[in-house]
């Protein structure tokens, strides 16, 4: 499977060490099979850093068979609770790969309202029901990155 990562630099050797902790699926290297999503994601870097680069990788399909994978098909109650746990630093799971929707601006606003206690879970899920998920894949261990993902090329935007 071809996947992409948006950044301000080319990343030929992805690592988990440089990732942030309290994000949607916790510490990991985030990729997407959607090129346009990666391009949009890294354009924010062009404004801040002056450069935007999409790195392309081949992610071996065997990773999804051999690794411990959590897959969210939509913005569900399980997705919302998992994202909240990760953002609070309370994720104690040992998933190596997590696949699911991105908390983009509109979704992020709903998640933040729920996170801050301004809306309840029922209202948050009602709002999320109408959002079409983008797709992110968090590879959460260096071993999986090293074994199953290989750099192909990059594109400067």
Image: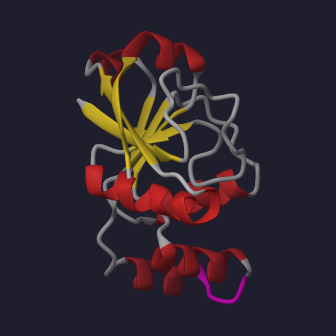
**Eyeballing the image, is 12 above or below 30?**
above
Q: Residue at x 58, y 23 (%)?
A: 141
Give the quarter of the image for residue 119.
bottom right
Does residue 120 belong to the magenta stretch?
yes
| Residue nearest the observer in this picture, 29 or 126 | 29
| Residue nearest the observer in this picture, 17 or 7 | 7
Give the quarter of the image for residue 28.
top right
Residue positioned most to the top: 147
Give the quarter of the image for residue 151.
top left
- Measured as percent of width and height from the top left, residue 90 is found at 75, 48
**Eyeballing the image, is 95 above or below 148?**
below
Q: Write the start and end of the magenta stretch as one range.
A: 117-121
Does residue 20 belong to the magenta stretch?
no
- Measured as percent of width and height from the top left, residue 47 is found at 56, 66
Quarter of the picture holding the N terminus: top left
- Measured as percent of width and height from the top left, residue 5 is found at 43, 42
- Measured as percent of width and height from the top left, residue 123 is found at 51, 87
Which secondary structure class fits the magenta region best?
loop
Q: Residue at x 52, y 46 (%)?
A: 7
């Amino acid at each position: 499977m071809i996947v992409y990562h948006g950044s301000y630099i080319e990343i030929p050797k992805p690592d988990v060490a440089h990732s942030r902790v309290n994000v949607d699926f916790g510490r990991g290297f985030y990729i997407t099979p959607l090129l346009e999503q990666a391009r949009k994601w890294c354009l924010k870097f062009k404004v801040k850093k002056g450069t935007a680069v999409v790195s392309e990788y081949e992610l071996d399909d065997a990773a999804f068979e051999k690794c411990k994978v959590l897959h969210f098909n939509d913005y569900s109650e399980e997705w919302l609770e998992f994202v909240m746990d990760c953002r609070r630093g309370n994720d104690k799971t040992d998933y190596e790969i997590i696949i699911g929707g991105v908390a983009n601006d509109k979704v992020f606003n709903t998640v933040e309202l729920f996170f801050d206690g301004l809306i309840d879970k029922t209202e948050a899920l009602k709002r999320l029901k109408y959002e079409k998920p983008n797709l992110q894949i968090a590879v959460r261990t260096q071993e999986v990155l090293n074994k199953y993902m290989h750099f192909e090329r990059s594109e400067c935007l």
